Amino acid sequence: MKITAEQLYMKLVNDYKLVGQKGKISFTLKDITVEIETKDTVGNLIQEWIKAWMIAHSIEFGNPPNSQDFPDFLLDPDAQKTNLLEVKTFDYSKSANFDVANFMAYRRSVLAHPYRLDSNYLIIGYRMTGNSLEIADVWLKKVWEITGPSEDWPLKCQVKQGEVVNIRPVKWYNAERTTYKPFHSALEFVNAFDGTQRQWTRTERDTITSTWLRNVIKGYKAATGRDLT
């Protein structure tokens, strides 16, 4: 069956009652089983579990041709401009620090495919003790609902030696207790993205930057029939 990201979220959280559920991570090879206590693989394993859960519940989905491509899942394989779903995970005992996207890759991607601004992000916060994992909370958000400004940049990013690397989330799940709150709209997000590329010395004067915002807004209208708001 085909369902929207919102329906998937409701089915996963309300019907399946994922929040609060516990599991264990282990690896078996022949007669030896190892309990996995590191968090390096948790994100990939949860994504694979989501895939298996969708199959078990007869939910239709597709994957991009390359497993590294955006998005993780196409909830409507027949209409590849809508119902795009990314899965993100983080250790709930710490602040969310996953990569929303590589900055330069996202710049190219949204310029070529502006409808990706409507993508849904299924975010799973977990707690882990030893090899035991508990699902602390689950959210379904748009990119502008999990990103925001930082002290130094219009858009919060991971910056290494002055180089902007990855877009990073703000603390959307406890906005009252953080100085830098999420954006209110897709338009606010792309304006902040544009402000960041205009501030960064690597991109401030290149030809793509000079027309990027205008072309994204125009392209979004052409792709969706709606104004970017």
Image (cartoon, rainbow, N blue to C red):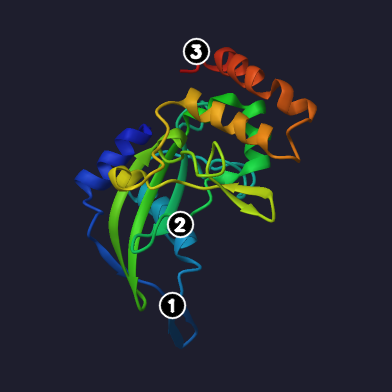
- Is 160 on the left or on the right of 89, as rendered? right
Question: In the rendered structure, which disc, 3 or 2, sits on the residue that comes first in sequence?
Answer: 2
Alpha carbon of mark 1 to alpha carbon of mark 3: how far?
47 Å
Q: Name the residue under label 1.
A: 36
**Residue 62 location (% of width, % of height):** 51, 40
**Residue 168 location (% of width, % of height):** 51, 48
Q: Residue at x 62, y 17 (%)?
A: 219
**Nearer the observer, 35 or 57:** 35
**Residue 15 location (% of width, % of height):** 20, 45
Circle 2 SS class = helix
3 vs 2, front mark: 3
Alpha carbon of mark 2 to alpha carbon of mark 1: how far?
16 Å
Disc 1 crowd rating (10 Å Cα; few below 14, some 14-19, many 20+) is some
Q: What residue type is labelled 1?
A: Ile
- Is 166 on the left or on the right of 53, as rendered? right
- The quarter of the displayed image where residue 114 is located: top right
Question: In the rendered structure, which disc, 2 or 1, sits on the residue that comes first in sequence?
Answer: 1
Alpha carbon of mark 3 to alpha carbon of mark 2: how far?
35 Å
Q: Which residue is drawn at 74% across and 40% down?
A: 201
Which disc number belongs to residue 76?
none
1 vs 3, front mark: 3
Q: Mark 3 points at which residue?
A: 227
Q: Residue at x 63, y 42 (%)?
A: 103
Question: In the rendered structure, which disc, 1 or 3, sits on the residue that comes first in sequence?
Answer: 1
Q: What residue type is labelled 3?
A: Asp
2 vs 1, front mark: 1
Q: Mark 2 points at which residue?
A: 48
